[in-house]
Image (cartoon, rainbow, N blue to C red):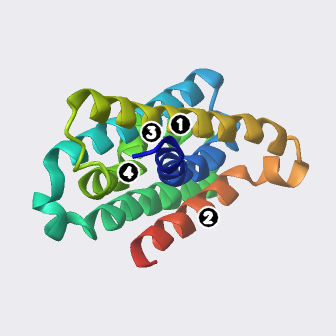
Amino acid sequence: MDILSLFLIAVALSLDALGVSLCIGLNNQIDNKNKAKFALSFGFFQFLFSLAGAYAGFMFNLYIVSVPKIIGGLIITIVGIIMFREGMKNQGECILVKKGMHFILGISVSIDAMVVGFTALNNINSNILIFEQTLFIGFITLIISSIGFYITKYLRKIEFIGKYADYLGGIILILFGLKMIFI
């Protein structure tokens, strides 16, 4: 696969992580350490799942193609609902900083990378080439989700967005999750 095609695939896969990064970054309780954990988690799971998909090949393609988007969409929708509810309760406690949330969201935005591994990367004969290409996908996701977190630093300065960040982030995650499920 040429580098331009691989780059376009990596960017397409990382758009889920970008959307979630923007929503997470809007929350004032998320510090730079947590943002880094989320970005690393998104990049790692994009790499891991595309690698697993490449090795699994087309054998499972008939059974798993529609499931990843539904599972990922459900998880993101549930997190969005919880985030919205937390904003309404205004308890000051953020669900996104709870233990394990980095892994949950990292997995949910990366499940579709497994399908790409099944379909686009399963015909590569060299293990080193598979590793390099899936590592590239993970790296692009890390960069794009980090850019999303950086952008939110400025978006939070807008009074309306800063005041209603939990609501906006929750609603966006709900809509994003529903889009993953139904479209």
C-alpha distance separating marks 1 and 3: 5 Å
Q: Are marks 3 and 4 in contact (CB under 8 Å)?
A: no
Question: Can residue 100 be seen from the camera position used here?
Answer: no
C-alpha distance separating marks 3 and 4: 16 Å
Q: Are marks 1 and 3 in contact (CB under 8 Å)?
A: yes
Quick one: SS at disc 3?
A: helix
C-alpha distance separating marks 3 and 2: 28 Å
Residue located beneath label 4 in the image:
108
Residue located beneath label 1 in the image:
140
Marks 1 and 2: which is nearer the front? 1
> Is 22 rendered above or below residue 146?
below
Q: Identify the amino acid type marked 4.
A: Ser
Q: Identify the amino acid type marked 1.
A: Ile
Q: Identify the amino acid type marked 3.
A: Ile
Q: Identify the amino acid type marked 2.
A: Ile
Marks 4 and 2: which is nearer the front? 4
> Is 44 rendered above or below residue 53?
above
Residue located beneath label 2 in the image:
171
Q: Is residue 101 left or right of residue 26?
A: left
